[in-house]
């Protein structure tokens, strides 16, 4: 891609066109705990029908390593945003983190549904819905669909503790429609991490939330 430019906190004279891709990744202590996972997911994304180039991924990695600590000084536990416009120009900036105010199962499902529609264009959904149905952990995407950085963490944590994951692309629609009584529901988000449903939560989903929080806590101790 031509015209990539890092902005961190200042846009200066650089002007982006209409955004075609926006990634929002959670920071901790001016670092990106899921850096490698996010960059792998970035490489699987699509802009204007074309796969993101290795050049753009390398640009993002370079600026995360070289300038993120300084650029995130104002918001050390904020959100890193990478914006790519329709011409393939890119910018990077950091903003404050704001937690979700409504976390009911239906609200989380609505977010996941919007993210799946985004994935129809960009190739990767930044948020996915998960639910326990008996002993199975259901993931609201197709098995062959590329996962976001945060979603790959959930996949790996599930395998580590021996939980079977089944893929069900219409999971969000089922939760919204009230079709199925799920034992526990949670959202996995690149920006918000693991968000437990305020209406259907439990010890198993809380275990994933605790695993994610440990990563953030580890980064804050550095």
Image (cartoon, helix red, strand yellow):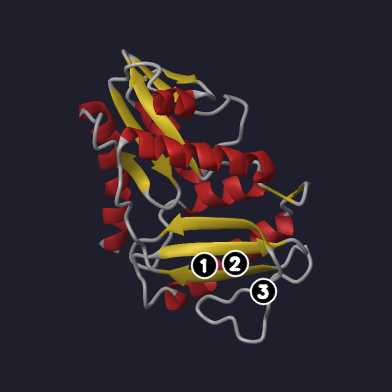
Q: Indicate left or right for 120 with 218 as reference.
A: right
Dot 3: element: loop
Identify the image quadrant of residue 208. Answer: top left
Taking the view exactly as shown, the residue that stands out farthest to the left is 203
Mark 1 secondary-structure assignment? helix
> In the displayed structure, would residue 156 be above or below residue 150?
above
Q: Secondary structure at mark 2?
A: helix
| Residue 80 seen in render | yes
Q: What residue do we see at 49% from left, 57% from top? A: 24
Q: Position of residue 34 (x, y in %)?
A: 44, 51
Q: Answer with left or right where residue 203 lies relative to residue 110.
A: left
Compared to residue 116, the image places residue 26 above or below, namely below
**Which residue occupies 43% across, 69% down?**
95
Tell me the number on the disc at residue 65: 1
Mark carried by residue 62 = 2
Mark 1 and mark 2: Cα distance apart in space: 5 Å
Question: Percent position (x, y) of residue 50?
Answer: 78, 48
Residue position marked by numbered label 3 in the rendering: 5
In front: mark 2 or mark 3? 3
> Could you say where residue 21 lies in the image, as x and y percent from the top left?
64, 56
In the image, 206: left or right of 26? Answer: left
């Amino acid at each position: 891609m031509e015209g990539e430019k890092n902005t961190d906190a200042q846009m200066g004279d650089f002007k982006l066109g209409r955004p075609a891709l926006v990634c929002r990744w959670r920071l901790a202590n001016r670092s990106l705990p899921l850096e490698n996972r996010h960059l792998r997911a970035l490489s699987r994304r699509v802009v204007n029908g074309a796969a993101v180039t290795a050049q753009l991924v390398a640009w993002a990695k370079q600026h995360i390593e070289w300038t993120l600590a300084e650029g995130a000084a104002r918001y050390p536990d904020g959100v890193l945003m990478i914006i790519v416009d329709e011409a393939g120009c890119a910018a990077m900036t950091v903003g404050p983190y704001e937690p979700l105010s409504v976390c009911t199962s239906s609200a989380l499902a609505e977010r996941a549904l919007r993210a799946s529609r985004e994935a129809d264009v960009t190739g990767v959904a930044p948020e996915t819905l998960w639910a326990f149905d008996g002993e199975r952990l259901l993931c609201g995407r197709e098995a062959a669909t590329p996962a976001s950085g945060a979603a790959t963490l959930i996949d790996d944590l599930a395998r580590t503790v021996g939980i079977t994951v089944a893929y069900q692309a219409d999971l969000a629609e089922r939760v919204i429609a009230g079709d199925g009584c799920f034992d526990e529901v949670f959202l996995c988000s690149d920006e918000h991490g693991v968000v437990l449903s305020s209406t259907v939560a439990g010890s198993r989903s809380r275990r994933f939330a605790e695993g994610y929080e440990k990563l953030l806590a580890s980064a804050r101790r550095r």
